[in-house]
């Protein structure tokens, strides 16, 4: 003999989200987006605007040529002596620092957008390079790093017969 069981009625009452619920949601969103895509920007909209105004991250161009890789980085306001370039395998790291003014004679800041402080920017190169032949130049706030490719990484055109 079959008996019918009554399903409990669904309630529409929900509990208020706790701090732990918000943290779970935040971490879940971070893992979906990945760490490199600024995971907190969707959570606190004003936070991103503030960090962009004070962030010191140079913009870069990476140009893959037949015999070399050219990396250009905008680093205005950085002295040549405050730049450091490191190459480890196919990872190029550029470090530098934009100096703070030592003192302000009069007045106070009402609004500031000029980025100051240290920065580090790393990029993975598309090919292997000959580390002993790397050269860097710096002029008018633009750093150029010439990275000659190794012989096995150089491109060759092959004639089809």
Image (cartoon, rainbow, N blue to C red):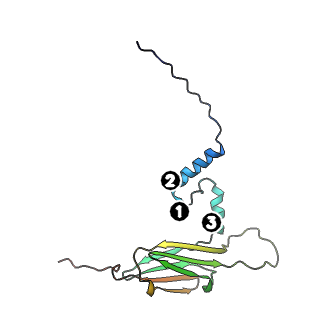
Disc 2 on helix, strand or loop? Answer: helix
* Mark seen at residue 145: none
Q: Do tag 2 and tag 3 residues touch (Cβ < 8 Å)?
A: no
- Using residue 51 as the reference point, say whether residue 128 is left or right of it: left
Disc 2 crowd rating (10 Å Cα; few below 14, some 14-19, many 20+) is few
Quarter occupied by the N terminus: top left
Q: Bin the neighbour count of mark 3 within 10 Å (Cα to Cα): few under 14, some 14-19, many 20 and up.
A: few
Q: Is residue 112 left or right of residue 123?
A: right
| Residue corresponding to mark 3 | 52
In the displayed orientation, state which residue is furthest to the right.
106
Residue 4's place in the image compared with 90, above or below, is above
Q: Distance between the residues labelled 3 and 1?
A: 15 Å
Q: Which residue is drawn at 64% across and 36% down?
A: 15
Does dot 3 land on a helix, a strand or a loop?
A: helix
Q: Residue 51 location in percent, x, y?
A: 64, 64
Q: Tell me the element at label 1.
A: helix
- Residue at left 54%, top 51%? 29
Using the image, tell me which numbered label, if any, was put on residue 32.
2
Instruction: Kindly report which numbered mark, 2 or 3, lies closer to the viewer in this rendering.
Output: 2
Residue lying at the far top in this picture: please name it: 1
**Quadrant in the rendering for residue 11:** top right
Residue 25 image point, x, y percent: 58, 48
Separation of disc 2 and disc 1 at Cα? 11 Å
Local crowd size for mark 1, using a 10 Å CA cut-off: few (<14), some (14–19), many (≥20): few
* CA gap, disc 2 and disc 3: 22 Å
Q: Which residue is drawn at 53% across and 78% down?
A: 73
Residue 49 in percent (x, y) is at 64, 62
Q: Earlier in the sequence, mark 2 or mark 3?
A: 2
Which quadrant does the C terminus fall into? bottom left
Q: Name the residue under label 1.
A: 36
């Amino acid at each position: 003999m079959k008996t019918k069981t009554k399903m409990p009625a669904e309630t529409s009452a929900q509990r208020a989200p706790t701090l732990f619920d918000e943290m779970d949601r935040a971490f879940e969103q971070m893992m979906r987006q990945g760490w490199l895509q600024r995971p907190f920007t969707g959570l606190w909209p004003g936070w991103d605007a503030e960090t962009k105004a004070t962030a010191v991250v140079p913009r870069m161009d990476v140009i893959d040529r037949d015999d070399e890789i050219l990396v250009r980085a905008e680093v205005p306001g950085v002295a040549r002596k405050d730049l450091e370039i490191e190459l480890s395998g196919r990872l190029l790291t550029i470090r530098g620092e934009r100096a703070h003014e030592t003192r302000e004679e009069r007045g106070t800041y009402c609004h500031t957008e000029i980025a100051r402080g240290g920065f580090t920017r790393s990029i993975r190169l598309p090919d292997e390079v000959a580390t002993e032949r790397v050269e860097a130049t710096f002029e008018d706030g633009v750093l150029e790093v010439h990275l000659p490719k190794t012989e096995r990484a150089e491109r060759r055109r092959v004639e089809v017969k």
